[in-house]
């Protein structure tokens, strides 16, 4: 396995010039002021290290089991940084296909392939939308369909949830995560996200208001528990290998933004012949509920 320095700069603006194909009509239902997800992921790659990659692998195996990934076909819908496509490759997936609507996210995924699996013909990458029915149908079916924290950012969440259902083969599994519906609180966050994406001044105002709040809230909790304030930042990488600061920015700016109650997602997929195998909720708070479904044999 080739491992190149993670601090090496790369171009996140034009993945197509490196031979990354675009799906037909690659485009989500755009709302004004869409967040630059890929730019944030490009920044995240500068802090990506072996420990974070190992945590990403651990989170996949915790929800799916290592035996489900090794030798399997793995579809990463909305690959973002490319970290979980990389994790699937390292866990022995027979074939991995990654696609994302954001060209900078496509470039990030391509960069991880270049750094770790430069000769791997069984890891393919494309720019496309989960809402593009023609493209989605062209992909066929897969053993594992993975889409973590993506489909609620398409601008057509329920349509996207339906599209990915058809990608799961007869014995396959679907692993998704969707923002938890908190009612009026979610509506308030939607307004914050819309404002963030109005321009540089709005972005600065939101970051200046909320990042100190996040830091201060964490500091109060840590002091009450007599814990070093730095511990939460060091430990956060154990959450799927993520970075707390990059997740803050993703949360503040992540728009389009839709939410769902766990039971709504459960009923949606039950009607489409899926059985819920595993559910991890965020306990009614901010964040994502995680679901693993498999096709029902009944």
Image (spheres, helix red, strand yellow):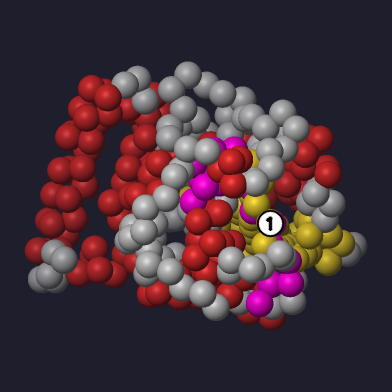
Residue at (66, 77) in percent of width and height: 92
In which quarter of the view is residue 91 placed? Answer: bottom right
Query: Outermost residue, bottom direction?
Result: 67
User: For the C terminus, which image quadrant?
Assistant: bottom right
Residue at (38, 67) in percent of width and height: 5
In which quarter of the view is residue 190 placed? Answer: top left
Residue at (67, 32) in percent of width and height: 26
Residue 143 can be seen in this image: yes
User: For the N terminus, which image quadrant?
Assistant: bottom right
Left or right: 190 with respect to 120?
left
Query: Which residues are drawn in magenta?
Result: 92-108
**x, y percent for residue 118:** 59, 66
Q: How many marks?
A: 1
Residue at (64, 68) in percent of width and height: 119
Left or right: 218 with respect to 99?
left
Q: Which residue is mark 1?
A: 124
């Amino acid at each position: 396995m080739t491992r190149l320095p993670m601090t090496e700069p790369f171009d996140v603006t034009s993945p197509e010039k490196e031979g990354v194909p675009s799906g037909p009509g690659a485009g989500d239902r755009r709302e004004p002021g869409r967040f630059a997800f890929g730019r944030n992921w490009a920044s995240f790659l500068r802090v990506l290290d072996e420990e974070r990659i190992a945590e990403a692998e651990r989170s996949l195996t915790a929800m799916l089991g290592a035996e489900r990934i090794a030798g399997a076909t793995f579809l990463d819908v909305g690959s973002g940084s490319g970290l979980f496509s990389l994790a699937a490759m390292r866990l022995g997936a027979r074939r991995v296909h990654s696609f994302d609507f954001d060209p900078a996210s496509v470039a990030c995924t391509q960069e991880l392939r270049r750094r770790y699996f430069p000769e791997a013909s069984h890891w393919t990458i494309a720019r496309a939308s989960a809402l593009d029915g023609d493209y989605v149908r062209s992909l066929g079916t897969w053993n594992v369909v993975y889409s973590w924290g993506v489909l609620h950012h398409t601008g057509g969440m329920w349509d996207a949830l339906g599209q990915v259902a058809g990608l799961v083969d007869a014995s396959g599994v679907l692993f998704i995560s969707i923002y938890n519906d908190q009612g009026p609180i979610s509506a308030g966050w939607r307004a914050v996200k819309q404002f963030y994406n109005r321009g540089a001044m709005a972005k600065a105002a939101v970051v200046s208001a909320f990042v100190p709040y996040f830091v201060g809230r964490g500091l109060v909790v840590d002091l009450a528990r007599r814990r070093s304030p730095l511990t939460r930042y060091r430990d956060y990488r154990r959450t799927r290998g993520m970075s707390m600061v990059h997740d803050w920015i993703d949360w503040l700016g992540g728009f389009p933004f839709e939410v769902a109650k766990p039971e709504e997602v459960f009923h949606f997929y039950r009607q489409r012949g899926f059985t819920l195998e595993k559910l991890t909720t965020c306990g009614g708070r901010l964040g994502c509920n995680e679901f693993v479904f498999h096709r029902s044999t009944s």
